Image (cartoon, rainbow, N blue to C red):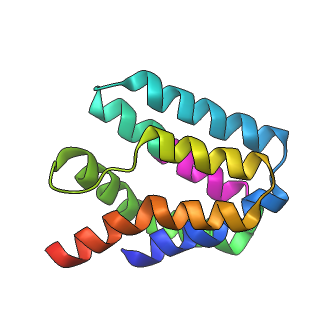
Amino acid sequence: LGHGFKIRFVAARLAATRRNEADLKAMTEALDARAAAGEVIAERIRHDERFHHSLVRASHNSALIELYDYFSHAVSQTIERTEMDSDLPEPSQEAHELLLAAIRRKDADKAEALSRALLTPSLNALSGKE
């Protein structure tokens, strides 16, 4: 479980320096759709997954992309658990938007830090529950 999360930390850093306009468009569209989904959980989960897949692809690192694809089923299950279980911390839309803003500004340090801040509470909560 943790590996899929940790891949996203590295991917966020790389995406900030390697992303292109098409990557930004894909991440923005996924986040906008996530926000528009509101309380329709299945849609919000689907668009959250799209955002994170887009972020990893924006790293333009084939090894990271392949690893993330390998772990994506476990990551998807984790996203679903954080959305469905009110005792687990669910990363907010605002936290996702801040991460995208750091990537847009090409601020690699901030992107990695925000990715960690976004995901670590869920990872810690899940580790304690299992």
Residue displayed at 64% across by 40% down: 27
Tell me if residue 51 is in the magenta stretch: yes
Residue displayed at 51% across by 67% down: 116
Q: Indicate the position of residue 97 as horizontal and vertical percent values.
A: 57, 41
Give, as a single range, the part of the protein colored magenta.
49-58
Left or right of 3 on screen, residue 8: right
Is residue 59 at all visible to an observer of this figure? no
Residue displayed at 65% across by 46% down: 100
Closer to the camera in the image, 47 or 98: 98
Tell me if residue 43 is in the magenta stretch: no
Q: Indicate the position of residue 68 as horizontal and vertical percent values.
A: 54, 66
Q: In the rendered view, would you say 128 is above or below 110? A: below
Left or right of 32 on screen, residue 10: right
Left or right of 54 on screen, residue 94: left
Q: What secondary structure is the stretch in magenta mostly built from?
A: helix
Locate the C terminus and report the quarter of the image it occupies: bottom left
**Quarter of the image holding residue 71?**
bottom left
Q: In the rendered view, would you say 85 is above or below 11? A: above
Q: Indicate the position of residue 90 as horizontal and vertical percent values.
A: 32, 50
Q: Indicate the position of residue 29 as horizontal and vertical percent values.
A: 62, 30
Is residue 104 at all visible to an observer of this figure? yes
Q: In the rendered view, would you say 44 is above or below 9? A: above
